[in-house]
Amino acid sequence: MQLKIRNVTSDDLDAFVEIYKKAYEGLEEYAYTKTREIKSYFRWLINRDKDGFFVAEVDEKPVGFVACDANWLSFFENEEVGEIHEIFVHPNWQGKGIGSILLLRALDYAKERGRRIAELWVGVGNVKAKRFYKKFGFEEKDIWGRWQRMIKRINPS
């Protein structure tokens, strides 16, 4: 198995849609469900910060994605943060460390861009994801509707 992390290109759209749908099975309340919406989301992520949008490939086949936006102004932190808008791995590849590698790549990207804080929003009821983020030092913060904000300090001030 050869794992490679690279920047996303527009050619990754179909793989993004396919893996996104599979990764969010059972979590539809926290996901886009229409193909058109997922494609728009993909384009929005590229436009927000294409340099922070990565795909994990195993033997040159996409298996997961992470999108870290280092241009995001956090209303809560009152500064630009490394906002992790999205991270998911195909269910067949979960539990093999790929999500961890993607998250660490996103955090490294935010550090490279000089951000002090990484921020993300996770579904309040998505216990598996919250446990995953806590393993990396993310702390639970505000709840807004069905979303919980989590942050991690990544660069000393």
Image (spheres, rainbow, N blue to C red):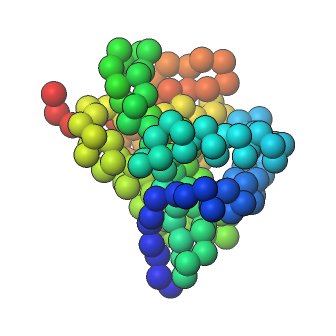
Residue 101: x %, y % from top left:
42, 61
User: Quarter holding the C terminus?
Assistant: top left
Q: In the picture shown, does residue 99 fall above or below 140? A: below
Residue drawn where x is 32% and y is 32% of the image = 117
Front one among 63 and 11: 11
In this rendering, the count of numbered labels is 0
Q: Quadrant of residue 11?
A: bottom right
Residue 88: x %, y % from top left:
59, 53
Residue 156: x %, y % from top left:
16, 33
Residue 31: x %, y % from top left:
72, 39
Left or right of 94, for residue 26 = right
Q: In the picture shown, does residue 9 fall above or below 4? A: above
Taking the image as drawn, is residue 129 in sight?
yes
Taking the image as drawn, is residue 132 in sight?
no
Q: In the picture shown, does residue 102 fall above or below 28? A: below
User: Residue reaching furthest left?
Assistant: 157
Residue drawn where x is 28% and y is 40% of the image = 113
Q: Quadrant of residue 43?
A: top right
User: Residue reaching furthest right?
Assistant: 34
Residue drawn where x is 55% and y is 27% of the image = 148
Residue drawn where x is 46% and y is 75% of the image = 3
Left or right of 157, for residue 120 = right
User: Residue reaching furthest bottom?
Assistant: 1
Left or right of 58, for residue 38 = right
